[in-house]
């Protein structure tokens, strides 16, 4: 009887440990969808959460802003450095994200950041690269 109780207890502990084990999602699984990349971008520009930003931006990405009649352009390194300088800085704006167009290779998302008195619209192009979905272009317009 003692052996049966010990065996039952051991089996219950084994099952509890197996069921309770949390599965960590791999970076490869995260990158299998454009939504991880767009959510990471939104978290970085609006909430200052830059943890995975470097992973979701392609090395050839271009960031452009239309300010008046001038276009200002940045590359990936400049964007990452700017994001790190503003880490944990939360913007006082309302975010609205929508998918403009999507297919198997490219997704275009629109991220509107509604501030008091103006809106910053970011048109984010994501491309399905060999290493998952990456941001390849962001074009920002201020209204």
Image: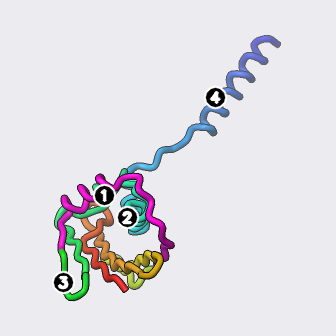
Asked if marks 1 and 4 touch (Cβ < 8 Å), the reply is: no
Residue at point 29% right, 66% down? 134
The earlier-in-sequence mark between 3 and 2 is 2
**95 to 39, vertically: above or below:** below
Q: Which residue is mark 4?
A: 14
- Place residue 56 in its image quadrant: bottom left
Q: Position of residue 126 (x, y in %)?
A: 31, 72
Q: How is the image coloured?
A: rainbow
Q: Nearer the viewer, residue 116 or 19?
A: 116
Residue at point 51% right, 44% down? 23
In this rendering, the label closer to the viewer, 1 or 4: 1
Please, what secondary structure does the residue beneath circle 3 have? strand
Residue at point 36% right, 53% down? 87
Which class describes the residues within 10 Å of circle 1: few (<14), some (14-19), or many (20+)?
Answer: some
- Place residue 105 in its image quadrant: bottom left
Q: Is residue 26 visible?
A: yes
The earlier-in-sequence mark between 1 and 4 is 4
The earlier-in-sequence mark between 4 and 3 is 4
Please, what secondary structure does the residue beneath circle 2 have? helix
Q: CA distance from mark 1 to mark 3?
A: 22 Å
Q: Which residues are magenta?
A: 73-97
- On whether residue 88 falls in the magenta region, the answer is yes
Residue 45 is marked as 2
Find the residue positioned furthest to the top: 2
Residue at point 40% right, 57% down? 48
Which class describes the residues within 10 Å of circle 2: few (<14), some (14-19), or many (20+)?
Answer: many
Q: Position of residue 14 (x, y in %)?
A: 64, 28
Q: Which residue is mark 3?
A: 70
For the C terminus, give its image quadrant.
bottom left
């Amino acid at each position: 009887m003692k052996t049966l109780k010990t065996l039952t207890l051991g089996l219950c502990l084994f099952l509890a440990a197996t069921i309770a084990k949390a599965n960590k999602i791999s970076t490869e699984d995260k990158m299998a969808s454009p939504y991880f990349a767009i959510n990471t971008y939104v978290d970085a520009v609006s909430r200052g959460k830059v943890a995975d930003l470097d992973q979701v931006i392609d090395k050839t990405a271009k960031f452009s802003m239309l300010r008046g009649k001038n276009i200002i352009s940045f590359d990936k390194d400049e964007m990452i450095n700017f994001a790190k300088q503003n880490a944990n800085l939360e913007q006082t704006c309302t975010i609205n994200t929508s998918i403009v167009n999507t297919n198997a290779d490219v997704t275009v998302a629109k991220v509107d950041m509604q501030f008091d008195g103006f809106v910053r619209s970011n048109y984010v192009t994501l491309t399905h690269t060999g290493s998952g979905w990456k941001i390849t272009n962001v074009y920002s317009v201020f209204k």
